[in-house]
Image (cartoon, rainbow, N blue to C red):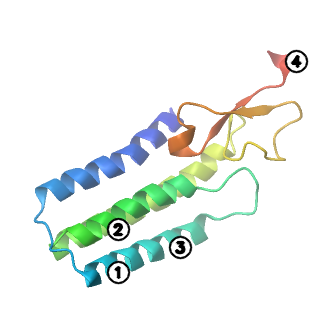
Amino acid sequence: MALAFHILVLLSIPVATVALLGLSRKAKLTRGQMVGSIVVSLLACLVVYGLSMHNCDRGQPFQQILIPGLCLAAGWALTSSRRIRIMLSGSIIILMTVLSFHYLFLSHRPDLVGNPESRMLQDGCQARFAWHTVVTGLYEVNPPEQYN
């Protein structure tokens, strides 16, 4: 259930961003807006990554930062309304942070891992690619053969 919620929220960010961009007035894209959107997005990504970084090899929340970060850059660059920019930026940064910490929670469960070569897997366990791995960065852990 927690994994399904994680996937749903992670995939809803680009959908909501595209919908919001479709409903708002388009900004005339200038060099300053492009640079500003990249700077704001990179700063937000670096701050959230710094908050959620940890020294274990079970995985880091790259997709949980990259996907919202790209949406943040697009929303910042393509929206002309200051109010919508602030609302979009705040909500994406909050969701980015929540998803990053939720990833850490999920990657430390016994049935999921973010790094398939993690030394923290129990003896005999193997991580395998799942249908959601491309989006979430999480692999499913098979129990040792003796438990199958």
Q: How far, Cα to Cα, is label 1 from label 2?
A: 9 Å
Q: Residue at x 39, y 75 (%)?
A: 38
> Which residue has dot 2 on it?
73
Residue at x 47%, y 34% (from the top left corner): 4
Residue 24 image point, x, y percent = 12, 61
In the shown orientation, is residue 110 left or right of residue 27? right
Horizontally, is 112 left or right of 134 in the view?
right
> Which disc, if any, is residue 46?
3
Task: Residue 86: give x, y in percent of width and height.
Answer: 26, 72
Earlier residue among tags 4 and 2 = 2
Label located before the other in sequence (3 or 4): 3
At x 60%, y 31%, the residue is 130
Residue wearing tag 1? 35
Q: Give the distance between the C-alpha atoms of the residues marked 4 and 1, in whole angstroms.
A: 55 Å
For this view, does 12 lie left or right of residue 55?
Answer: left
Q: Residue furthest bottom?
A: 32
Q: Amino acid at mark 2?
A: Ala
